Image (cartoon, helix red, strand yellow):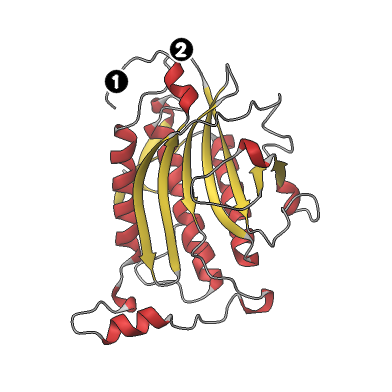
Amino acid sequence: MTTFSAPVPATKSLPTNQSALAASFTSFLTVSVHQILFLRSVYPRATFLPVRAYNYPVRQSRHPKVCDYINDASIAVGTEILKGTITAVSIIISSLRTNQPLERYAFDLSGFPRAPAGEVNTTFESRNEDSSNAGAPGGPSPTSVDLEAQFRACLARLASACARLTPLPRDDEFSFTVCIEVREDALPPAGTTNEEQTWIVAEPGKVHLRSCTAPYSVSKVRNGESQQQQPSPPVSNGRAKTVPVRRVEAGELRLELWVEEARQKFNEPVESEQPP
């Protein structure tokens, strides 16, 4: 078993500035996307290699184009974190036959700090609640939090959550899209610079996240073209099934991960998935 091929920086210590925070999260996002694709059998499981990340066994796609797309998407997400525009990242698995979204893996980043453009390498100021907890008897010190252990626990909970989901339809093929939601006071990153041309604007009513209120959503472009080759049908207004995964609070890196299953997924007859 080998280690994850994408760079996963040492993460036992907490990120001390915006640049380090972006690097820590995007590395975790890269690992998570590969793991989600494997756990949900979006591609044949034989095309994934057993590797380790954060001292935890995961899987990584062997397909060069899949790896390039995930790496490019993670880099683009990191750029938006540095700009302070992003409030959520979502991995959406869709049916190729119906072009319907079936599952969303939502990373709520609304707790991330915002730093001015010239201060992304400036050390964070301590939060008031961190200082008060550190001084309380028996209270954990912010510097004692092991970020690698937090990510490892999140990956374990993700595997457990995926095992509880309704299987995807056996008679279908699937695609995935990386989407972000931006803050209400931020413009969508689409078309202004070469980096922003990585994204395309998605219609607000067709990408909905439970805990995000941002009006703009954008999705990652694959090979210079939009992944949506046909108009995407609107998501049902009915309540989707939500499976919480884990909340991470490690210094300034504060996120929440959950899974949503769209209502239309349950309209398809499915068979039980074979164990890995």
Q: Looking at the image, which residue is at 25% across and 76% down? A: 140
Which labelled disc corresponds to residue 274?
Answer: 1
Q: Tell me if label 2 and label 1 are in contact, CB under 8 Å.
A: no
Q: What residue type is disc 2 on?
A: Asp
> Vertical placement of 193 versus 95: above or below?
below
Compared across the picture, whether 192 is left or right of 101 comes to right
Query: How far across and how far down the image is residue 60, in percent?
Result: 43, 40
Query: How far across and how far down the image is residue 189, in percent?
Result: 72, 53
Query: How far across and how far down the image is residue 185, in percent?
Result: 69, 62
> Can see residue 38?
yes
> Vertical placement of 66 versus 88: above or below?
above
Q: Looking at the image, which residue is at 47% across and 30% down? A: 262
Q: Residue furthest right?
A: 192
Nearer to us of marks 2 and 1 is 2
Image quadrant assignment for residue 69: top right
Compared across the picture, whether 16 is left or right of 250 comes to right
In three-dimensional space, the C-alpha distance between marks 2 and 1, rounded to whole angstroms, equals 14 Å
Quarter of the picture containing the C terminus is top left
Compared across the picture, whether 7 is left or right of 202 comes to left
Sequence order check, earlier mark of 2 and 1: 2
> Vertical placement of 219 versus 103: above or below?
below
Query: How far across and how far down the image is residue 28, in percent?
Result: 44, 54
Which labelled disc corresponds to residue 171?
Answer: 2
Q: As rendered, which of 70 and 171 lies closer to the eye?
A: 171
Q: Looking at the image, which residue is at 31% across and 68% down? A: 146
Q: As rendered, which of 99 and 223 lies closer to the eye?
A: 99
Count of all numbered marks drawn on residues in the image: 2
Q: What residue type is disc 1 on?
A: Gln
| Mark 1: secondary structure | loop
